[in-house]
Amino acid sequence: QAPLVESGGGSVQAGGSLRLSCPHSGVVYINAHMGWFRQVPGKTREGVAAIDSNGSTTYAGSVKGRFTISKDTAEKTLSLQMTNLKPEDSAMYYCAAGPGYYRLGLDEYFYDYWGQGTQVTVSS
């Protein structure tokens, strides 16, 4: 079983909401940083939101106030609640995990577990 498997993507109209989920019981790091990234074809992957083992979070400016990252420690599931979605949010969204001894951030270099992605499409 893959350590990270995203779900919850889909197609919505602008202003709508989606909730992405990512079970991560296969991640071996004890105090992992967990994050959500997205990528549009032809563009580099960008960090969207991240959370550390203490619950501290960081967000990309473009999603701050609209997206909320959270984790259920008992269920070992990472989530991303997305509200007020915009067409520019359309992308493949990836769940990621990395060692917790780095400073929490949105640089993909510090994450070495990756899911296969789930597509989010927002129409205007």
Image (cartoon, rainbow, N blue to C red):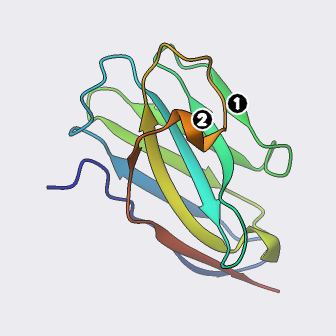
The image position of residue 57, as x and y in percent, is 64, 26
In the rendered image of this protein, does residue 109 appear above or below residue 30? Answer: below
**Residue at the image position 62 percent from the left and 17 percent from the top:** 103
The image position of residue 30, as x and y in percent, is 30, 18
Q: Secondary structure at mark 2?
A: strand
In the rendered image of this protein, does residue 6 appear above or below residue 122? Answer: above
**In this rendering, position of residue 68 left or right of residue 9:** right
Quadrant assignment, res 59: top right
Neighbor class of circle 2 (other Cα within 10 Å; few <14, some 14-19, many 20+) is many
Front-lying residue, 3 or 13? 3
Indicate which disc residue 104 carries: none
Q: Amino acid at mark 1?
A: Thr
Q: Confirm or deny contact between disc 2 and disc 1 (CB under 8 A).
A: yes
**3D distance between C-alphas at marks 2 and 1:** 5 Å
Indicate which disc residue 50 carries: 2
Q: Amino acid at mark 2?
A: Ala
Front-lying residue, 96 or 49? 96
**In this rendering, position of residue 30 left or right of residue 26:** right
Q: Secondary structure at mark 1?
A: strand
Image quarter (top left, top right, bottom left or bottom right) of the C terminus: bottom right
* Residue topped by disc 1: 58
The image position of residue 50, as x and y in percent, is 60, 35
**Residue at the image position 55 percent from the left and 17 percent from the top:** 102
